[in-house]
Structures are given as C-alpha cells and as structure tokens.
Image (cartoon, rainbow, N blue to C red):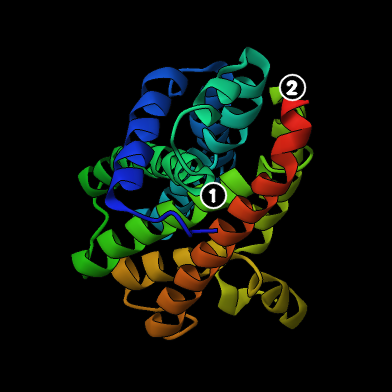
Amino acid sequence: MFETFSMEQLKRAFAITKKDLRIYYNKGPVLIFGLITPAFLFLAFFIGRNLTVEELFPGLIGMAVFFSSTSIGPGIVPWETRSRTLERILSTPISVWAIFLGDVLASFLYGLIISLVPLIIGVIFGATVHCWLTLCLSIALASFCFSSLGILMSAYPPSDIPATVMMVSSLVKFPLLFISGVFIPLGQMPLWSRILASISPLTYFVDLIRYSTQQTSYFPITVDFAAIILFALAFLVAAIKIHERTLPQRLS
C-alpha cells in the first residue's frame, strides 16, 4: 500500500489537502453536518437542564470535533467522482495512499480550526482547563482519528452521489455519538452501555476532555490516548485499502 512512499508523494498529498480545503469547506453538506447539526444537538442538550459550564464543556468540544472532522471526508470522493476530477488526479504521478492521506489531512485541519470556536467560547464563559497539554494533544489526535473515519465512510458504497454517502455516514456517526458518554458520563451509564461505549473512539476523546477540565476520567489517560491512536491507524489503513479496491468501480 505504501510501496511508493517518498517525500515527493507527501508533497503531493499536501497539494491535495490545499485543494480540498479551498473547494469543500463551504459546501452545503459540510456546513450542515459540520456546524449546524452539532450546534442544534448541543442546544437540545443544554436547554432546560441545570448544568455547569464544566459539565457542558466536554460534550461541546466532543461534538464539535467529531462532526467537523467527519464532515468533509464523506463528500470529497463522490463529488470528485461525479465531476470527473478523480480521474484527472489519478492520471498524475501520485500514489493512491497520498490522495487519501491528503483528504484526511484536509478534514483534520478543518476539525482543528472549528474546534477553536467552542474552545474559546467555553473558556470565555468560565470553563477551567487544568491540563492544556492533554487537551490540545487530545484534540489533535481525535481530529486525525475522526478524519480517517470520515474517509473510511466514503469508501463504500462507491457512489458518485454525495447524499448517499452522507446518509451512510450519518447512520454511523449518530449511534457513535449517543453511546460515547457525550451526554451522560460513563460512570453513570449501565454496564451494557459502557461495553458499547468502549468500541467508539469518541468515548476516549470525551474522557480526555473531562480529565483536562474536571481532573476525572473513567479510563487511565494512557488508555485513552492509546485507543485513539489505534483507532486512527486502523481507520486510515482500512480507508486506503478499501478505496484502492473500489476505485475501478468509481471510474467505470
């Protein structure tokens, strides 16, 4: 898969990243699923509940990073398949892995940028961050992990209709959101819910945010970091492998 790894291929991956950010950041589905959806979910969670800023902050950051980092990826490949730009990209001397790494990096940077908004808002309204290093590192790793998940979700079905891929991605993202301890801390969930939560990368990210702001966590933070890294690598490798297999169907 990475048999043509080189610095030249990495430069081409960064060129794909710049192209994606320039073209896709303001697309309708990206704005809806990356900004509007988490905002309304947060308001629905917040209104009518007597919660402190410290209790709201982990969920706000978790939803913002999760939805923004997974909003661009599912749309890139079907959009480019439909516009025939994918064929032109593949005709250039760039490896398949470099194309999709560039897509992942675009989603990663978009997620990082969007995460600054709720972070600044939370701090302004009184959220206390006890460990900035853990917070910043967890946001960076989670953004990359969720971006890799977004590219993986665009791999199948190999459709050129963005709405189809977005629908599939929603069927994955919303269940992950509700089992991941975003709205209810893991310690307050029943055993079966905690078992389900352990299969979601968002669970470990929210746990790290709670540690950074409340100095409490359900898992040891080393477990949280290790889980996010392992999920990120698994998603990235799986995304590239599946895309390599489905590309001929997209181009036919």
**Cα distance, mark 2 to mark 1?**
40 Å
**Which quadrant does the C terminus fall into?**
top right
Q: Nearer the viewer, residue 131 or 5?
A: 5
Residue 181 seen anywhere in this rendered image of the structure: no
Q: Secondary structure at mark 1?
A: loop
Residue shown at 39% from the left, 70% from the top: 208
Kind of residue at disc 1:
Arg
Measuring from the top left, give residue 224's x and y in whole percent. Answer: 45, 76
Residue tagged by mark 2? Answer: 161
- Left or right, 199 with reference to 121: right
For the point 57% across and 79% down, the residue is: 187
SS class, disc 2 = loop
Q: Where is residue 197? Give x, y as percent.
A: 65, 70
Image quadrant assignment for residue 136: bottom left
Q: Is residue 16 above or below residue 127?
A: above
| Numbered circle sitting on residue 49 | 1
Answer few, some or many: residues within 10 Å of disc 2's Cα (few below 14, many 20 plus, some between 14 and 19): some
The answer to whether residue 196 is left or right of residue 223 is right
